[in-house]
Amino acid sequence: MALPRFRRARGGLVVTAALSLALTGCGGDAGSGEGGEAATAPGADAITEPVEIEFWHSMKEKNELAIKTMVDDFKKVNNKITVKPVFKGDYDQMVVAYKQAVQQEATPPLVQIYDIGSRFMYDSQQVVPMYKFIEKDKFDQNANIEPNIASYYTIKNKLWSMPFNSSAPLLYMNADAVKKAGLDPDKPPATLDEIGEWAKKLTIKEGGTVKQFGFNAALYGWFVEQLTAQDNAEYCDNGNGRNGLATKVNFGTGAGPKFAQWLGDLVKQGYATNTGRPTDQAQNAFKTGTIALHLESTSALGGYTEAAKDKFELRTAPFPKPSASSSGGTIIGGGSLWINAAGHTDAEKRAAWEFVKFANTAEQQAKWHAATGYVPVNPQAKSNDNPNFQVAVTQLRAQQPSPATSGCLLGVMPEARKAAEVGLEQAVPAAAGQDPKTPADQAMQNAATTLQTPIQKYNANVEQ
Ligand SMILES: O=P(O)(O)OC[C@H](O)CO
């Protein structure tokens, strides 16, 4: 399907139906912008005098401090450019803030968007694609960006955003609890069933009270995406939306219901606690030391390392596979940096690129990785000697990019993740001894079906 023709809007900017749809979900004139393939990348001569740019991000606590350190480091070597980091809430809140900014013609020159916002950003017509700066500067992409990471942000063979905070999902262990139960943290469980077996041995009850749960994980749609890829299956059709627009999601069958059933059973039997969808709640429970095994992103590692200090021995292990025969891998997570074209001067766009290049350097990526736990995007970056930090790096480098592990490109991917979480909520009982609201197969299938109309509406308005 051809992209609807641009039309001129006030101020010489342009609106597309694709953008309108992405912004409002219902078509109509919603914003303006001049970006996408049409945008150009200004050269180094665009900066002739001091320039200040806002950098919107979603990093909090320890990870936000690491951003501030990076910005300060940048200022020391680029005295003409001031980068002002602005925390805009979590990843979902950022997308809301970004959409509002497009409507108000007030986007920042530089924005961090989570992985699953990539197709939306591509369709938004707001950005200067990263490959244009790469070409302009003859930047060596292969030498500076891990191919396994770049694959996620590569759309139609071109890199659209710069991977920045790249993560992998992990199994976290309270190694003291593991050892006390006579289990060996050096031989961690590798499948959901093995985790279930461990969780039973690791749950400690005193009287009627649970002192330690064997397992917890947020009801987080990201885990459904990861387990699907671990099964070497595609989350959405058309080669995970990379051979053409995806027309449906597949989490109604396979790893989605398997995970929902497995977690529901563990909660019902009292071996896992259900802390709901907010990842903060599952994270806080793990940090108290009363959870033995836990699933989270490597992005939490910096904070966990600090929280566990003097409390318990923290260990990480590869993310589990749905079953021993699963032959896939994990998907790169986290977010990437997008440079906005609409309404920005050449100096601002160039300043944003200068910071993006700086953030990608081996030195900065090594520092960033050591502070946060994110995987270094630059293969030349030294990884942290702490073995907990190396698990995600090894996990990522060991796998070959494939359609499954490149992740699903879908304009309504944030909605898809939320739908999967609604499915999990239906399938996982609130507490021990309770039944789920809906059987797992049906809950996940129902959730997947709710996406058909949003996907069709989105696809009707964007180019293939
Ligand atoms: O917690 P992060 O930054 O690793 O992100 C996890 C997911 O990829 C976000 O979509």
Image (cartoon, rainbow, N blue to C red):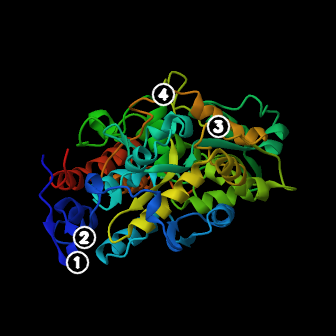
Q: Looking at the image, do the residues carrying marks 1 and 2 touch, with CB atoms under 8 Å apart?
A: yes
Q: Is residue 302 left or right of residue 32?
A: right
Q: Which residue is mark 2?
A: 32
State the image coordinates of residue 318 (x, y, percent, origin top left).
63, 35
Q: Looking at the image, do the residues carrying marks 4 and 3 touch, with CB atoms under 8 Å apart?
A: no
Picture residue at 42% right of the left edge, 37% below the top: 406
**CA neighbours of label 4 inside 10 A, class few (<14), some (14 to 19), many (20+):** many
153 or 25: nearer the viewer: 153
State the image coordinates of residue 422 (x, y, percent, origin top left).
40, 56
Q: Which label's residue is closer to the chain start, 3 or 2?
A: 2
Q: Which residue is mark 3?
A: 380
Say which amino acid is labelled 2. Answer: Ser
Q: CA distance from mark 4 to mark 3?
A: 26 Å
Q: CA distance from mark 1 to mark 4?
A: 49 Å
Q: Dividing the picture into quarters, in which one does residue 266 lie?
A: top right
Please tell me whether mark 3 sits on a helix, a strand or a loop: loop
Q: Which label's residue is closer to the chain start, 1 or 3?
A: 1
Q: Which label's residue is closer to the chain start, 4 or 3?
A: 4
Q: Is residue 216 left or right of residue 426?
A: right
**CA neighbours of label 3 inside 10 A, class few (<14), some (14 to 19), many (20+):** some
Q: Which label's residue is closer to the chain start, 4 or 2?
A: 2
Q: Mark number for residue 328?
A: 4
Picture residue at 45% right of the left edge, 34% below the top: 405
